[in-house]
Amino acid sequence: MANNWRCSSCNCFLWRGSSSSESYSSSSSTKLLLFMLPLLVVAGLISVLGPNNPSNLVDIAKKPLSDASVTVTTVESPPLTKVVKKKQRGEGLVVVAVNNAHGGKQEEAKAISETLFNHSSTPSLPIQAIETFIQSNTTGGILNASSKTWPIVGSMNESYYNPIETPRPQRKFSILDRTEAGLLQARVAIREAKNRSQLQDIDYVPIGPMYHNAKAFHRSYLEMEKQFRVYVYEEGEHPVFHNGPCKNIYSIEGNFIHGIEMNDRFRTRDPEKAHVYFLPFSVAMMVQFVYVRDSRDFGPIRKTVTDYVNLVAGRYPYWNRSLGADHFMLSCHDWGPEASFSVPNLGKNSIRVLCNANTSEGFKPTKDVSLPEINLLTGTLDGFLGGPSASKRPVLAFFAGGLHGPVRPVLLEHWENKGEDIQVHKYLPKDVSYYTMLRKSKFCLCPSGYEVASPRVVEAIYTGCVPVLISDHYVPPFSDVLNWKAFSVEVSVKDIPRLKEILLSISPRQYIRMQRRVGQIRRHFEVHSPPKRFDVFHMILHSVWLRRLNFRIHDDL
């Protein structure tokens, strides 16, 4: 036998020999070809369709290959969910869902940045981003974040290996969520206003150095008109609640209470839609009807305020939801700050609108509002507004008033009966009109009394006289908007001996500008019934609106 063959270790079927061997080789080759053909077809289709279409891969894999049947199931994994969580002294949580499948990191950063808007001087609260994997077990409950269910995936294509994750149903947006979203839009609009052109307004366009930022103020005012809503608690009875004086030194209390209760634009009857909640009590009326005269017992007033807050906190969820942060009270009486401390969270968290805006006694300009003290003797402005120009004011400075508090005695000690140019009187002669003297004077001296506020500030503005604020620790009204240095003079108590020197250092040209600006900002201190745009009623509301923009309220999850 002379059969030639190659090494069997090469597995080459190249036998040379008898015919029987050739017949066997031909039969084997045919069987091998029939066995390999389906595999080649499958491989060709896979190479054509490629891995970019996993659904086609599933269809192909479901067909039988040779004697075996293999099934591959792919499950499309839902996007992960980022939860932005903010705690606010136990007041609740805020959740922002971010889809990672489409720019997840960018959207997460944007969501977090939107929750950080706080332009007050107080530091923002911490925000923590937490990644959670939420699963559902066989009983429908929520599994622990460490428990994960993985799908059964065939071994043919490991690149399509995805975990099975059941998405958590997103929380429905509440009315509060929509309210806070509106406030967020307002913040953005106010922030961008300074870089845009001046808005037009049929009534008044704020402009000039009397404003810290006239464009931002105007935009903020328009945003307030568009969406700001106040809920007035209806509990309480006259004369202490829903009532206030309108014809004396505390007249701003009654004017605001009546103004907000009769207002259809800003007052809402639905507390769910409110941005802030007003506690409609009058401290001035408490002093008249609750306080026992000369008793020096503040207990009855303190109990009245405490009982009222407890009443509304028990009937409504809003006080406890924010710990009073979105509630405000208003008082022009000297005892207003003391009344607010009757309830710790009222003094600490709530917006306090006070005439007695004394920073040394706990007044916080970023949270509280300075209220102008307005003495309306007749209840109207008739006869109080207007005065001559600067050239027709021969008196340099004027003051008349009793020795109330620690500042006025110092003023009278240095300047009473010291000349015609500076007229300082304890009591005016009977034939001399107080308002006539205001109109004859270039500067009107406004020293503090028992408390820092004085009605003489508004009286000076009404008559076109440049006010001179003589006080320490006093925050002037609406100073978040108004630049008081542009139309008034501020003198500390220690500089009272230098008063004439300070006033004479102001050039005639500079004084004329200041006096004109007094006339321009007068509208913000005028009292009208019904209220008019940009008047004192609306400026008080705007100050509360600005404080409400400084924080956010969150629903409990």
Image: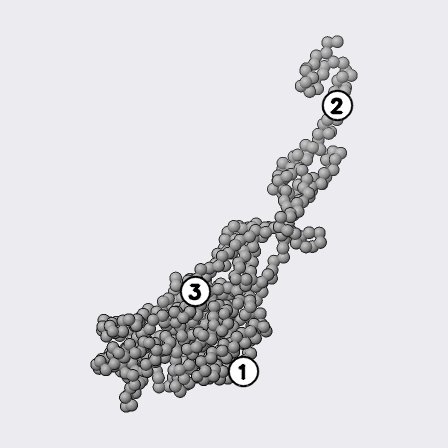
- Can you say whether 482 is above or below 83 in the image? below
Q: Quadrant of the C terminus?
A: bottom right
Q: Distance between the residues labelled 3 and 2?
A: 86 Å
Please give the residue where the numbered disc 2 appears in the rendered image. 28
Q: Earlier in the sequence, mark 1 or mark 2?
A: 2
- Can you say whether 111 is above or below 237 in the image? above
The percent position of residue 381, horizontal first and vertical second, equals 38, 84
| Nearer mark to the viewer, of 1 and 3 | 1
Toward the viewer: 394 or 498? 498
Q: Earlier in the sequence, mark 3 or mark 2?
A: 2
The residue under the point 39% across, 69% down is 359
Quarter of the rendering containing residue 475: bottom left
Please give the residue where the numbered disc 1 appears in the rendered image. 237
Toward the viewer: 18 or 426? 426
Q: Earlier in the sequence, mark 1 or mark 3?
A: 3
**Within 10 angstroms of label 2, few (less than 14), some, or many (20 or more) residues?**
few
Please give the residue where the numbered disc 3 appears in the rendered image. 190
**Within 10 angstroms of label 1, few (less than 14), some, or many (20 or more) residues?**
few
Type of amino acid at the residue the image marks with label 1 = Glu
The percent position of residue 394, horizontal first and vertical second, equals 23, 81
| Nearer mark to the viewer, of 3 and 2 | 3
Toward the viewer: 372 or 219? 372
- Which secondary structure lies at badge 3? helix
| Residues tagged 3 and 2 counted as in contact (Cβ below 8 A) | no
Type of amino acid at the residue the image marks with label 3 = Ile
The percent position of residue 154, horizontal first and vertical second, equals 68, 40
- Can you say whether 246 is above or below 492 in the image? below
The percent position of residue 222, horizontal first and vertical second, equals 44, 70
- Which secondary structure lies at badge 1? loop
Q: Can residue 229 be seen in this view?
A: no
Type of amino acid at the residue the image marks with label 2 = Ser
